[in-house]
Image: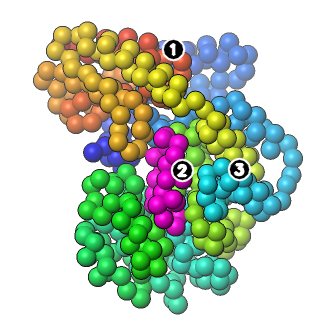
Amino acid sequence: MWSRRHFLETISALPLVGGFTAASTARAATAAGRKGGRDYFAELGVRPFINAAGTYTAMTASLMPPEVMAAINYASTQYVMLDELHDRVGQRIATLLRSEAAMVTAGAASALTLGTAGVLTGTDRQKTVDLPDLSGMKSEVIIQKSHRFGYEHAVRNCGVRLVEVETRDDLERAIGEKTAMMLFYNNNNRVGRIQDEEFAQLGKKHAIPTFNDAAADVPPVDNFWKYTGMGFDLVAFSGGKGIRGPQSAGLLLGRKGLIEAARLNAPPNGNTVGRGMKVNKEEMLGMLVALELFLAKDHARENREFERRAEVIRSSATAVSGVNAEVFVPEIANHVPHVRISWDGADEATAAAAVIAMRDGEPSIAIRSEGNALVVGVWMMQPGEEKIVARRLRQVLEKKG
């Protein structure tokens, strides 16, 4: 199963080739020149690319719509009290997402830290100062062994110890006086032996707060209220992926008391575990507008467009002898059409080489590999870029034959 962790490990292992070619710099400078402004990326020697991979943080996730940028620019010209804006934006988001309460965070990882901190400290101001010293607080978080993931440090920042379980019986035996919370990684729902509804029910049965990391799991849009509706006490989402808000923003949804406690561990409060996780007024307003746009969108129409783009790429790839390609939709995270491509004699090394060839070519295009196959994500492309990706991909595949 593909995961955010697997992707980050793979991309970090690839050599940094073709980053500063004269052709790519000239292309970027030309694009900026047409707009009559400075080309900051060209000045810095940073090469832009067509995103045919997906909403990965390392690839700067998604592009914000003009309406979001307008909200950010609006907020940048005036002063407000940050806590007041936090309150009002949180209330609006909670209403939109059918949640008891909500807050904007500095990304989904920040939501994990602040939510965990809120569970541990409640509204005790001294405890917010004491973290990660857990003297007088509960100190264990239960997680399924199959749900260990590359972002759990955000929870461990609060000083807790993760206790692994595999079965329902394991979980119930693990619950004790030190148990503070139960953590669930939504991407691995089908992998674990305790699935989402049962996990949330067990939390209710034992009066243990449950926290679901669903960072990359919209669309579909109803996931926003699906998990709180199941009974999860806290749910985290990324703001800069499918929602197309600021990449440095996220959402924490859940019970009112827990959100209030999380807020006490967050800026502008000083001397807390979350002090460094600032969310400015521009990000708060941008996140709200991005969410409003996302909820109002015709998702069925957008999905048909993604299917069309995927078919353009699939048909171009399969025009090359020995190449197989299929359109698929991941079950949970990034739940939109993708294209999986393989060819005769392909292995992990040749697939990784194709990724580099696409990134190093002109124009530069980011795709990803998964074992011996290439995976192309179409939803972060700009209109018309699917034709460019299809053409370049065919050129690379023809050289593999």
- Secondary structure at badge 2 equals helix
- Give the answer, above or below, for where 313 lies relative to 112: above
Crowd around label 1: few <14 · some 14–19 · many ≥20 (10 Å): few
User: Distance from label 1 to label 3 (Cα)?
Assistant: 31 Å
- Give the answer, above or below, for where 231 lies relative to 304: below
Q: Where is residue 169 in the image (x, y as percent from the top left)?
A: 25, 76
Q: In this view, does 389 lie to the left or right of 262?
A: left
Q: Which residue is drawn at 26% across and 9% down?
A: 319
Span of residues in magenta: 212-235
Q: Nearer the viewer, residue 99 or 376?
A: 99
Q: Position of residue 390 (x, y in %)?
A: 38, 14
Q: So how many labels did they put on this image?
A: 3
Q: Mark 3 points at which residue?
A: 284
Q: Name the residue under label 2.
A: 224
Residue 21, can we see it?
no
Q: Position of residue 216 (x, y in %)?
A: 46, 46
Residue 312, can we see it?
yes
Q: Nearer the viewer, residue 115 or 193?
A: 193
**Picture quadrant where residue 206 is located:** bottom left
Quarter of the image with the C terminus is top left
- Give the answer, above or below, for where 9 lies relative to 90: above
- Secondary structure at badge 1 equals loop
Q: Nearer the viewer, mark 2 or mark 3?
A: 2
**CB atoms of marks 2 and 3 within 8 Å:** no
Q: Residue at x 64, y 68 (%)?
A: 256
Residue 384 badge: 1
User: Distance from label 2 to label 3 (Cα)?
Assistant: 18 Å
Q: Callout 2, which amino acid? A: Phe
Q: Callout 3, which amino acid? A: Met
